[in-house]
Amino acid sequence: MGQGKSQFSEEELQDYEDLTYFTKKEVLQNSTSSAHHKFKNLAPEKVGHNKNAKLPMSKILHLTELKVNPFGERICKVFSSGNDGDCTFEDFLDMMSVFSEAAPKSVKAEHAFRIFDFDGDDMLGTSDLQQIIKKLIGDNELSKNNMQRLIQNILDEADLDDDGALSFAEFEHIINKSSDFLNVFRIRL
């Protein structure tokens, strides 16, 4: 079979290029290195020729980089337009764009903060920090005392205004000190 007509109009592709850190080719190229190809491969039976398909979070989590990421579900929920983890192609494209090498550090920091802000109060409080630590240590357990001490150490280091939580500005200050942040907050097409 020959090459079919694109599901997306030239105007849609231009919008995707304008609104993401991808070129039109990276969005739709008929190869294994396009965002649409990655999305379609997660559920070919559902996406097929339906450009408006919405994949459940369970399918999105099959993406290798999310499968091994302890924050995979949070990432899906943050980028899902319905905040339920289910993603349309545009949600997926937004996620892939933010995790691309071309996305600026400030955009990545904003989304990292949203991923870590479990309760959605625009602050990383002790409950958020506890959930972050639990995700990072996996099945390893910390005693209640060690958990409290670790959270206090984080706050002592990063809570510049001593209000018991990290604001986005304080979080961004930490990110700017981290030389490895751009390398770990990345998914390649």
Image (cartoon, helix red, strand yellow):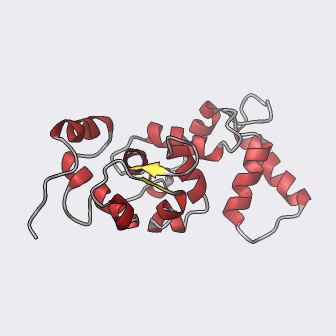
Q: Residue at x 34, y 66 (%)?
A: 44
How far across and down, in percent of the image, does residue 111 sit? Answer: 52, 42
How far across and down, in percent of the image, does residue 169 sit? Answer: 60, 31
Residue 117 placement: quadrant = top right
As drawn, which residue projects farthest toward the right?
145
**Residue 175 placement, left or right of 40:** right
Above or below: residue 102 compared with residue 147: above
Q: Residue at x 71, y 40 (%)?
A: 119
Front residue (pair 65, 174) = 65
Above or below: residue 93 compared with residue 48: above
Q: Residue at x 51, y 57 (%)?
A: 56
How far across and down, in percent of the image, does residue 76 sit? Answer: 53, 52
Above or below: residue 121 compared with residue 60: above
Front residue (pair 159, 76) = 76
How far across and down, in percent of the image, does residue 187 sit? Answer: 41, 58
Q: Quadrant of the C terminus?
A: bottom left
Number of numbered callouts drawn:
0
Q: Residue at x 35, y 47 (%)?
A: 52
**Residue 102 placement, left or right of 67:** left
Residue 72 placement: quadrant = bottom right
Q: Quadrant of the N terminus?
A: bottom left
**Residue 13 placement, left or right of 160:** left
**Residue 169 placement, left or right of 25:** right
